[in-house]
Image: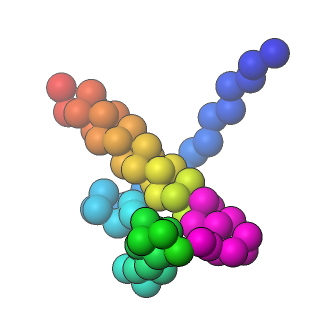
Amino acid sequence: MSQMVAIILSLPDDLARLCLPDGVNACLQSLLDRQDSGQRLNAAERKEAEGLVNLAELLSLLRLRVERIGRRTKS
């Protein structure tokens, strides 16, 4: 059984702000760089990296949807 949930958000006018903050992004990049270089991440680091990737993807999807809605309302 699928359900639809509507969420009303107040979004910034500057869509570039819908991204990870610089410090958080640097942390994620560091973890991913270590992993890409063959270093194993411990369980906590892996969990942190996965959570940050999921958050970055969510923010990207929100940004794309807001852009699409903005284009529709301007037409």
Q: Is residue 1 left or right of residue 13?
A: right
Residue at the far bottom: name it.
23
Q: Is residue 54 left or right of residue 46?
A: left
Q: Position of residue 40 (x, y in %)?
A: 59, 72
What is the magenta range?
40-51
Q: Is residue 18 above or below residue 42?
A: above
Magenta: main secondary structure equals helix
Colour approach in the figure: rainbow
Residue 3 is a magenta residue: no
Residue at the far front: name it.
38
The quarter of the image holding the N terminus is top right
Residue in the picture at 48% in, 69% down: 38
Residue in the picture at 53% in, 74% down: 39
Q: Is residue 1 above or below residue 24?
A: above
Q: Is residue 58 above or below residue 32?
A: above
Q: Position of residue 46 (x, y in %)?
A: 64, 67
Residue in the picture at 23% in, 33% down: 71
- For the residue pair 5 and 46, the one nearer the viewer reads as 46
The answer to whether any part of residue 13 appears in the image is: no
Q: Find residue 52 and report its image quarter.
A: bottom right
Residue at the far top: name it.
1
The quarter of the image holding the C terminus is top left
The answer to whether any part of residue 1 appears in the image is: yes
Q: Position of residue 3 (x, y in %)?
A: 74, 23
Q: Position of residue 20 (x, y in %)?
A: 43, 69
Number of on-image labels: 0
- For the residue pair 59 and 43, the one nearer the viewer reads as 43
Residue at the far left: name it.
75
- For the residue pair 29 and 75, the one nearer the viewer reads as 29
Q: Is residue 20 left or right of residue 1?
A: left
Residue in the picture at 43% in, 43% down: 61
